[in-house]
Image (cartoon, rainbow, N blue to C red):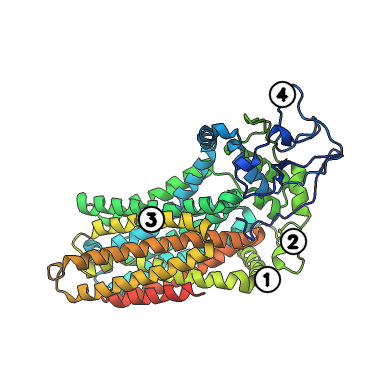
Amino acid sequence: HRGSGDDEERGHGSNEGGRAVPPLVFSGRSTQSAGDSAADLLISPEQSVRENDDVAGLYRYSGDPLRGGESDSGSAPTPARSIDEFLEEAYRFPTLTAPSDRRSAMWSAHRARLPYYLSVLSMGIANSSDAAEILCISYVLSDETFDRTILRGDVAFRGGVLAGSVFLGMLLGGWGVGVASDRYGRKRTLLLGLVTNSVAGLLSAAAPNAWALSLMRFCAGVGIGATVPPLFTLVTELSPPSRRGFFVTVVASFWMVGSIYVALVAMLNFQAFGWGWRTFMVLCAAPSAAGAFTVGRYVPSSPRFWASVKGRYGEATDIGNGIATMMGAEHGRIRPSGLRFRSLEVEEVRQRCSSVGRHGSASSEDPASDDYHGTHIAPPTTICSFFRFAWSESCLSFTSLYSPSLRHAATLPLQSVWFALSFGSYGLLTWINSIFVEVHLKDVYLNALLFAFANLPGNILSAVLVEKIGRRNTLMSAMALSAASLGSFAYFAKDANAAASAENRGEASTVAIVLSACAFQSFSIAGWNALDVLTGETFPTSVRGAGMGLCTASGRIGALMAQFVNSALVRRPAALLSVAGMTLLVGATV
């Protein structure tokens, strides 16, 4: 599946040292077909590839190891590979073997790809820190000691400011870092966000009052906002096209890991050991620190960033070949089927990028295809120059993102969906434990843990559906079902809130409340996974980070507004849930 983000577009051939490289055809098809199965790429002796011995192709059939291939001067030149095509070939190379040995080959391929899987795991840990920092405040707000000593009973205003400060920081961090990731690279800005997040999380534990804590949560929000745009941009650009939806969904599914971690820590901290909220805040900063360590150690930079945005083809080539090695495809390695892998070359990257311009579109009328950084603004050296730089880069990004080709087709619709989904889900997650208290559930922490585990079916569902029915259909269906689940939740919450205690309510009503809440969480997480994939694939490389930042900023505005709406309605759970459900339903129709 190739979205508009696959913009290092089609070259027409390559020449190496003046010699034409023959075409690489497997079972009558070119290697450019990213959707072919591994079995379709097997070469039989009757379909052997003819090539000069001293000009290696991507894969080589060597039925006779003593003889090698036969030269054929009449062969057509092989097209230069884009980075996407190269990553696709590298990912599939370990599976190319004889059909009789296919099962063992798959296990061997997974073992060979372990370093690559470790990089995906590292990005997942980074995403789990987002959940940990956002959800931790929900448990803190429902703690009676915190309410008495820090909020002093003022949940509507002080609680709203505290919950909203995180999303205000996420708003600023998301947009600013989205632009920076298109200037300095995805990995650098991701690490900056993770470090900021972990430090601010630790300092939150030392806050003496609600206002100091709100300031620390604002800084933590800046760190959270700084992780999302470069994270999903990076995983999009490091994934082979045929598995991009799957790997983006895997990274997105680590929100579940973070939410389960926070729920377990809350149960142990508050219920089992009786520790205070300050210890809880320290423990919730751990995923950010772990993410910073693993990303810095195991995740490569984006080769597409260095090629398409910076024009540094040598660095892009080296990084691309390093990723291929992580996938188990090393230069010169030969499979049992006789296929040999050829590494990416600088001229291939240069040719594919220069044939359409550095920013991925052949159309000179599309601002996203122009030399986006052509003004060559000097890197900032002072605080004032930094703000001038940020303003200039933001203006350039806005020009591209709101160009006629992107404004109505991508930017505005995605902003609307991000706003609606954030208002309905993020806005509710911050107050979910307080809602559980208001509807008189007996064990808040156990129900919160069940709520966290409800992410699992949503992740499984989205991993299947994004490839089966498409990103857009999965997103719309998930948002509509989330709205329906909140309608059910509101119906039963109305009766529960009218009861004096849980004893005055039937067991069936309690089960219905928990099931409705879990269904909402499952469908909303499926919607988020589909939206992450869709957004990452929609924008071209040169403004992908800025596009992700703008969309996440729109989402943060929605979540920020929801904090004040929900803090005013938290004593009336049915009304709160109805507002969130209607917002999701409107977003599903965009």
Residue under label 2: 374
First in sequence: mark 2 or mark 3? 2
Which label sits in the foreground, 2 or 1? 1
Residue at left offset 34%, top offset 52%: 260
Residue under label 3: 457
Q: Position of residue 513 (x, y in %)?
A: 26, 67
Which label sits in the foreground, 1 or 4? 4
In the rendered view, tell whether residue 227 sits above or below residue 477.
above
Distance Cα–Cα, label 2 vs label 1: 20 Å
Residue under label 4: 65
Which label sits in the foreground, 1 or 3? 3
Residue 268 left/right relative to 60 = left
Disc 4 is placed on an element classified as: loop
Give the quarter of the image for residue 99.
Answer: top right
Distance Cα–Cα, label 1 vs label 3: 37 Å
Disc 3 is placed on an element classified as: helix
Which label sits in the foreground, 2 or 3? 3
